[in-house]
Amino acid sequence: MPKGKEGGNSNDSRFFTTQKKGEMHELRMELHATEKHVKVDAVKKVIANMTVGKDVSMLFTDVLNCVQTGNIELKKLVYLYLINYAKTQPELTLLAVNTFVKDSNDANPLIRALAVRTMGCIRVDRITEYLCEPLSRALRDEDPYVRKTAAVCVAKLYDIAPDLVAERGFLETLHDLISDSNPSVVANAVAALSEIAESSGKDVMKISAAVLQKLLAALNECTEWGQVFILDSLAKYTPADGREAEGIIERVTPRLQHANSAVVMSAVKVILSYMELMGSSNSDAIRALTRKLAPPLVTLLNSEPEIQYVALRNINLIVQKRPHILENEIKVFFCKYNDPIYVKMEKLEIIIKLVSEKNIDQVLLELKEYSTEVDVDFVRKSVSAIGRCAVKLERAAERCIGVLLELIQTKVNYVVQESVIVIKDIFRRYPNRYESIIATLCDNLDTLDEPLAKASMIWIIGEYAERIDNADELLDTFLETFEEEDPAVQLQLLTATVKCFLKNPEDTQDMVQRVLDLATEESDNPDLRDRGFIYWRLLSTDPEAAKMVVLGDKPVIEDDTFRLDPSLLNILIGQIATLSSVYHKPPEAFVVRRAAGIANDEDDEEDEDDEEYEDGAGGDGDLLDIGGMNISDGGASSMYETKAPMNKVCGPEKSNGI
């Protein structure tokens, strides 16, 4: 064996080392060499340069000449190069068409499949007409490897020329391949049809009773990724009745024990989708399935952190849909010391969803332990979780508050601040029940330096001013730095001061006057100024109305543990094991689909954008038209004209009683 060839096979990384100047000329010489191993090494160098971003398109014809070879390794490399540069050199790519057609008739099935696959990957319109005949032969090839490659190629061709696929009857051929004797061919046919269905928006799969049985039969024999494609197709199928759904679930259930987590999640998706159709009449069967779903989901949490995270995001949805599946497995979601932060955060979310009166004591002990960790974000989330448990479970609220008070006694700055924030939520959930702890909170005023914590404490002081002897003094300490505070703190200070004034007008008149002056005269924040003017006008015209507005009963906050909208949750359950289930968003929120057969020409889009900007002045839309109010139109402004201008109201005697 020649020495160079042996070296080329043993260590291909050498092709990625920096080349000296003038290398293109040397590569061209090597590409025309007679020795096979020199030619292979030369193409490898070209591919290496292409991979690291160098432009080697000037060698197109030289590389193309190498395609006339029986060496399958060299042919693969040349085809890889052609796929990369076909779009920029479409005219020259046509020169390789004869080679593709010739290779599609080769005696070697690997070369036949390679030719068809490469033609499918070259997204040039002129190539498609030459692709149809070889593709038609490949779909009926005697070798299953060629057939399964051709099946995927149909989906790629549909993306470029959907009409051509329909005209040549390739969709019908794909349907025939579902009945193929080879399970890999069946899986690829299903994958191709699913891809076409997604891009076209049409139901090209058309699963009938006969097709269903063939899919279920292939499920036991094909590769793991083939199983994923088949299971995803089954998830989109709607069984005729509960009995058929139960029958399919029975055939799918063994996949829950599969080693591949993608297969497990796809099987879970099918079972959850069909459980809806089984109805309440089959409660025993649903209970049995619920017991079967827990172990595979728990097993996924023994994988690598990245797989754990994806599994946890999916479990988050499953728990919201059917909390009973994992209600007895809460311990599995307790955080380990070596879990990455993103896994810990997701586990906390699931713990909050699974917490109940049966396990609250155990959970509180665990959360209290987490609150002494070193990771600040994790500690904050843990303290917040204690508050959310209190909001969720009324009977456990007192125990949760006890834990929060213990954490406040630690005097750790960020723990105290997060505790104040969640206690405010507990007060809003259970008004007039736990005010005895306000004194403890007031003792820790000096430690508060974050806007949200300050705003929460100020809200508590304003809301319960009548129960705090020195409420006005406490607020006065915050007012010293009013102008430097965050807008959220300023807004809360303004409202809390007005509340104090309405509850105790004699002692706080000067203070409220000072705050209203600061809010309306010194501040640049329009929200703060507007609120200041509204309070001033209310206080100067009708103090009783001000009491009703500012001191009125507030709605009790709701438990937001299961906060996803039911319709969105159903969509996401149908998208389990996809990116949608990780982002918790429907596909259309982050995927922009291009209609099949429409070329994605960025240059054209940019030209169109330029034209739109040029035509903007004469177009129908007005850049100043905000929400239907045309700012530039003088006639429309009268409709929104303020009847009483918002002048600062200094007092009834100075403003003629307004």
Image: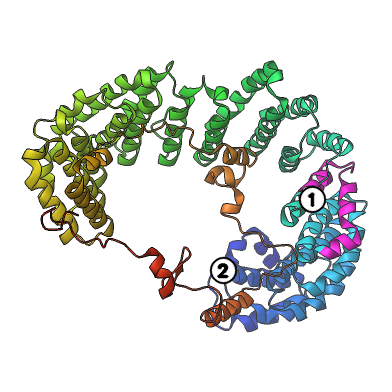
Pointer 1 with pointer 2, Cβ within 8 A: no
- Is residue 186 found inside the magenta-colored segment of the image? yes
In front here: 404 or 542?
542
* Residue 32 in view of the camera: no
Give the residue at the far front of this rendering. 656
In front here: 519 or 404?
519
Point 8% across, 44% down: residue: 509
Q: Main secondary structure of the magenta part?
A: helix
Secondary structure under tag 2 reads loop
- Left or right for 429, reference 91: left
- Left or right for 401, reference 33: left
Point 86% across, 42% down: residue: 182
Secondary structure under tag 1 reads helix
Residue 193 tag number: 1
* Residue 410 in view of the camera: yes
In which quarter of the view is residue 95 placed?
Answer: bottom right
Range drawn in magenta = 163-191
Location of the N terminus by quadrant is: bottom right
Question: What amino acid is labelled 1 in the image?
Answer: Leu
| Residue 141 image offset from top left, x and y in percent | 92, 54
**Residue on which the image places disc 2:** 52
Residue 254 tag number: none
| Residue 45 image offset from top left, x and y in percent | 64, 71
